Amino acid sequence: MKDPVIVPTGITYDRESIEKWLFAGKKNTCPVTKQELSADCDLTPNHTLRRLIQSWCTMNASYGIERIPTPKPPMNKTQIAKLIKDAKSPQLKIKCLQKLRSIASESETNKRVMEAAGAVEFLASIVMTINTLEQVSDDGVEVLTRAISEALGMLYNLHVSEAGLKSLIGKNGEFIETLLRVMQNGNYESRAYAVLLLKSMIEVAEPMRMISLRTEFFIELVQGLKDQISKQASKATLQLLVQLCPWGRNKVKAVEAGAVSVLIESLLDCSERRTCEMVLMLLDMLCGCAEGRAEFLKHGAGLAIVSKKILRVSQVASDRAVRILLSISKFSATPIVLQEMLQFGVVAKLCLTLQVDCGEKAREKAKEILKLHARAWKSCSCLPNNLL
């Protein structure tokens, strides 16, 4: 322990560890007693234990043990509020952002104090200046762009509380529209932070907010996937699309934004298990609508790459891949599609699925696909006699 603190249950923990548990990990219980702790519970410094630790360090200095420094006390709301209030010009805002970033890096408690002092609203107001970027002089654009990128990074790294995220979303979703603007016009760093922040906001958003998202929103998400801004941003985008697609017409909006083609392309060189599973999960969702299946079949590699992932990634991936093929076989099995499935080895892969341990669900779906194909082949005069 470097900075021992006592939680309301009477147990002492190291400050950094318990703050990560409560704030970054969003847990609400005492790890030892399992009693509930409030989101704003006080962490009282255990000065007696800290002095004992420091004394022990001093006594054992000859063994190379360094004395732990006396920790700095957390900032208070008044100090943060004054810092924010004094930041009026663009240059002062940049300095304020740098100071806030330094304060936030010291402890999770400082992050909570910053949120309580209005730092979230201050940072959001800086991000929203992107809507007036055209009115700023050339010299001011660079300063403002830097400030926006810095503010976005801080908003994400503050691990804003659920109440704070809901407040950011607001009644009319104005901040979501601002983040859309960042995704359209920002640099790679700003776009990455915008996606990560959006993911956190959508996790607490009301269903109507998710249903009302415009197609432009999905276009920018798909473009971010295509541009491969960063691994973290790509993963967040996939998770975001998985959350959004079940609501309203979002599946169709994602298809119209070109998601199917981009997802298939990403599967071609995808080697990470969890990413493959999410891509296949999304394709399965999108193939649940006619528009999605049509786009899937337009892509020359769709059937081949999806069948290739069966038995090669994980049981979850195999199940999702078979589900995609079932959707195609049930609702889009034209004679040409049937021929392609034979040529690409899809049918052979499904037969193999019946012979190995790939999960009961995948096996049952593979059987269903083969039965559908058998019925289709009998009535399909365009196939060669040896296949009928």
Image (cartoon, rainbow, N blue to C red):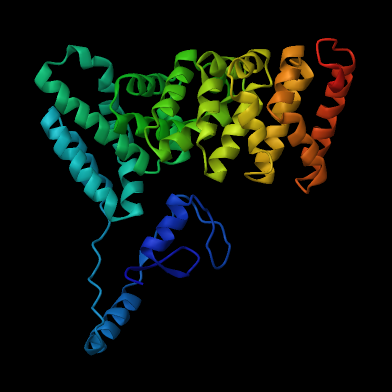
* Image quarter of the N terminus: bottom left
The structure residue drawn at horizontal position 77% and vertical position 38%, both measured from the top left corner, is: 362
Image quadrant in which you'd find residue 154:
top left
**In the rendering, at what x and y percent does residue 15 appear?**
37, 63
Locate residue 4 relative to residue 221 in the image: left or right: left
**In the rendering, at what x and y percent does residue 368 appear?**
84, 29
| Residue 283, above or below 94 | above
| Residue 222, above or below 123 | above
Locate residue 171 relative to residue 179 in the image: left or right: right
Count of labels in the image: 0
The structure residue drawn at horizontal position 34% and vertical position 41%, both measured from the top left corner, is: 115
Q: Is residue 203 visible?
A: no
| Residue 196, above or below 357 | above
* Residue nearest the viewer, comparing 73 with 156: 156
| Residue 350, above or below 185 | below
Image quadrant in which you'd find residue 155:
top left
Image quadrant in which you'd find residue 133:
top left
Q: Is residue 218 visible?
A: yes
* Image quarter of the C terminus: top right
**In the rendering, at what x and y percent does residue 77 appear?**
27, 46
* Residue nearest the viewer, comparing 96 with 250: 250
The structure residue drawn at horizontal position 19% and vertical position 42%, both measured from the top left corner, is: 98
* Residue nearest the viewer, comparing 257 with 76: 257
**In the rendering, at what x and y percent does residue 91 appear?**
11, 31
